[in-house]
Image (cartoon, helix red, strand yellow):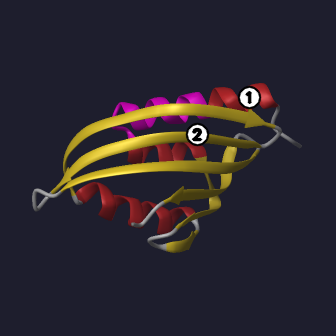
Amino acid sequence: MSTTTHNVRERLDDLIDHIRTGRIMEALTEFYAEDAVMEEPAYGKTVGLAANIEREQAFVDGVKEWKGFDVISIGAGDDVSFYEHTMDWVTQDGTEVHVEQVAVAKWKGGKIVHERFYYSMG
């Protein structure tokens, strides 16, 4: 059964709200399937919700201060969504980080089954 475009957009808006309000770890259990695959240039593919929670917790633990999360554009279709955004934070050692990225997700039954992040490593 496919998720309607309307439902995908609602779920995406809720996911973005979770991220924007600092509920990143809660978002994983709410929006990602047990067999979800997350893929990004720095880490390659991380398979399964448990592995993604572990990877994401290590990322969150490395953040000393969140500076910003701004969504630039959003799109949703049948079982697919994307959002382009910027994120700014300070690491535990004081390094300021700015990332511009696009997240493309495939949905099934209201949960993300595959998400790929596109950003420059340069």
Residue wearing tag 2? 83
- Taking the spot 63% from the left edge, 60% from the top edge, the residue there is 36
Q: Where is residue 121 in the image (x, y as percent from the top left)?
A: 42, 66
Q: Quadrant of the C terminus?
A: bottom left
Q: Where is residue 98 in the image (x, y as percent from the top left)?
A: 31, 50
- Left or right: 99 as drawn, with respect to 45: left
Q: What element carries label 1?
A: helix
On residue 7, the disc is: 1
Residue type, mark 2 in image: Tyr
Name the residue furthest front.
122
Q: Which of marks 1 and 2 is nearer the N terminus?
A: 1
Name the residue furthest bottom.
44
| Neighbour tally class for label 2: few under 14, some 14-19, many 20 plus, Cα within 10 Å | some
Q: What element carries label 2?
A: strand
- Left or right: 74 as drawn, with respect to 20: right
| Type of secondary structure dominating the magenta stretch | helix
Q: Which of marks 1 and 2 is in front?
A: 2
Q: Where is residue 50 in the image (x, y as percent from the top left)?
A: 50, 65
Kindly report the distance in space between the C-alpha atoms of the residues bearing marks 1 and 2: 15 Å
Query: Which portion, as a residue range, is magenta?
Result: 12-23
| Placement of 66 over or under 105, stated as above or below | above
Residue 15 inside the magenta-drawn segment:
yes
